[in-house]
Structure formats: C-alpha cells, structure tokens
Image (cartoon, rainbow, N blue to C red):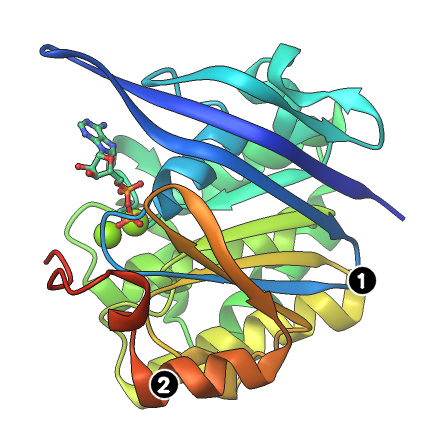
Amino acid sequence: MSVLEIRDLHVSVETDAGSTPILNGVTLTIRTGETHAIMGPNGSGKSTLAYTIAGHPKYTVTGGAITLDGEDVLAMTVDARARAGLFLAMQYPVEIPGVTVTNFLRTAKTAIDGEAPAVRTWMKDVKQAMKNLRMDPKFAQRNVNEGFSGGEKKRHEILQLEVLKPSIAILDETDSGLDVDALKIVSEGVNRAKAATNLGVLLITHYTRILRYIRPDFVHVLVKGRVAEEGGPELAERLEEEGYDRYLDGEPEPS
Ligand code: ADP
Ligand code: MG
Ligand code: MG
C-alpha cells in the first residue's frame, strides 16, 4: 500500500522570459489500487503536474509538498523517485538515439530494482508484455521512440509500465492520437497492471473517451492551475456533454 500526497502545490515554469506560475495550489491524494482522472482544458497545467511529480528540472516548486508514504518526493532525485515506485508516461515521449527498447527496459529495471533482472524470466516477461500489447517482436531491437508512430510511442510507455511494475503511475494523455483499437490495447495494458500489482493510476486526459475503458474512481477537473471541481465517474460523463466552457467564464478554450 502506497500513498502519494500532493498538498497545496504551487509550481512555476522557468523560461527565457522568467518564471511563470502555472499551478496555484493543487491538493490530491492517490492510493495504490485507486484510479484518479485529471481532466481539464489545454494549458490548465496537467502536464506541469505530471512533470513536477517526476522531477523535471524546468518546473520549480514554489510552495506546498509532495510525499510518497510520508517521504519527501521533492527532495528526491529523478532516479530516486522511480526507485520509490513512481512512473511517468509522458505526453510527448522522447527519442533515445542509439538505445534499443530491450536495453532501455533492462537498464531501467536494473536501476529500479538495484540489481539486474534474472535473464530468463526477464526476457519471457518482456516478450509476454509485448505480445499482450500486440507489438511486433522486432520492435525490441529498435531505438527508443526513433521513428515510432504516435500509437507505437504510447504502447512503448505501457510496455514500460507492465515490466517496471511501479506502485503509482502517472499517464499523461496516453490516449491522445490513438485510434479505437490502439486505445483498447493500451487501456487493457493499464487494467492488467492494475489487476496484477494493485497499481495506483493518475490518468491525465483531455477527453472522456479513455474513461470508458479505464474506469476512474475519482475525477478532478484542473482549470488554470487549480482543481475546479471533484467527483466520481459521473463528473466525467457530465464533462463529455458540457465540455469545459462552464469553468472558463466565457473565454474560449485555448488550443
Ligand atoms: P496541459 O498539459 O494542461 O495542456 P501544460 O502543463 O502543458 O498544460 O501547460 C500549462 C501552461 O504552462 C501553458 O500555458 C504552457 O504554455 C505553460 N508551460 C508549460 N510548460 C512549459 C515550458 N516548459 N515552457 C514554457 N511554458 C510552459
Ligand atoms: Mg496540452
Ligand atoms: Mg499536457
């Protein structure tokens, strides 16, 4: 059982133009076994929240706290956060030239566990996970995200989730750009991880579509860096009908 607690989080992004506040007091608690959907219009700070939890250097925490089982996450290095059981599937996964999927997964697993995985069971696990995600075995020898289609990038994120077995996963728009078949495959992967390891999920999405396949226990609407509303799955259904306009006081949604 793990608990990720985010309390009154304030975050600014550092750009050439200076420091701009993006998150203005976000409070959330995610326990293993729970699925939380974070929804909201473009530019509301969803990815900023994800990157801050993962430890991206561009984002500066100016107030509040993040703890995992009482331990100060903000004091941990990026590596230490992964070892503690946190996982981020990025909205825009990055290319790693010269590093194959196989080597990447093995290196990540070794770093997280503190020892290399046993060769035979490891290869079996990776092959099975790739099969579950309907990935061509040849994929294992390609360089990470190099020339991957949008759908392949998202599957590769879920492949990591399945073999690295974190306790809390943050999935940032893992649904974006997927057709219905790919969406189902990716959702099944998340649901398998939930069933196998009692994973806690922070599912960031702009659209309600993925929530038909991955049922959230809680829905939080993030608007302008604040949680504007919270509820159960019925809130997602309402957003599907009404959109985000009611939170934006007449302003059109930014694209
Ligand atoms: P969302 O994921 O909800 O679409 P983001 O967290 O990506 O929102 O962005 C929130 C706001 O912060 C936007 O106005 C965006 O332009 C700004 N922002 C986020 N990250 C950066 C960055 N690395 N550099 C400059 N601006 C950023
Ligand atoms: Mg966005
Ligand atoms: Mg985003």
Q: Residue furthest front?
A: 249
Instruction: State the residue position of label 2.
Output: 240
Q: Nearer the viewer, residue 175 or 140?
A: 175
Quarter of the image for residue 17 reads top left
Q: Which x, y percent locates residue 73? A: 67, 22
Residue at x-position 61% and y-position 17%: 74
Q: Is residue 228 visible?
A: yes
Quarter of the image for residue 64 reads top right
Q: Which x, y percent locates residue 179? A: 26, 83
Mark seen at residue 153: none
Residue at x-position 52% and y-position 41%: 105
- Look at the picture and state if 112 lies above or below 177: above
Q: Which x, y percent locates residue 126? A: 58, 58
- Look at the picture and state if 73 lies above or below 203: above
Taking 1 as reference, is 21 left or right? left
Residue at x-position 25% and y-position 60%: 248
Q: Is residue 181 visible?
A: no
Q: Nearer the viewer, residue 226 or 210?
A: 226
Q: Residues within 10 Å of mark 1 (few under 14, many from 20)?
A: many
State ligand 1's quadrant: top left
Mark 1 / mark 2, whichever is N-terminal: 1
Q: Residues within 10 Å of mark 2 (few under 14, many from 20)?
A: few
- The kind of secondary structure element at disc 2 is helix
Question: CB atoms at circles 1 and 2 under 8 Å apart?
Answer: no
Quarter of the image for residue 140 reads bottom left
Residue at x-position 74% and y-position 47%: 167
At label 1, the amino acid type is Asn
Taking 172 as reference, is 168 left or right? right
- Look at the picture and state if 58 lies above or below 109: above
Q: Which x, y percent locates residue 66? A: 65, 27
At label 2, the amino acid type is Glu
Mark seen at residue 198: 1
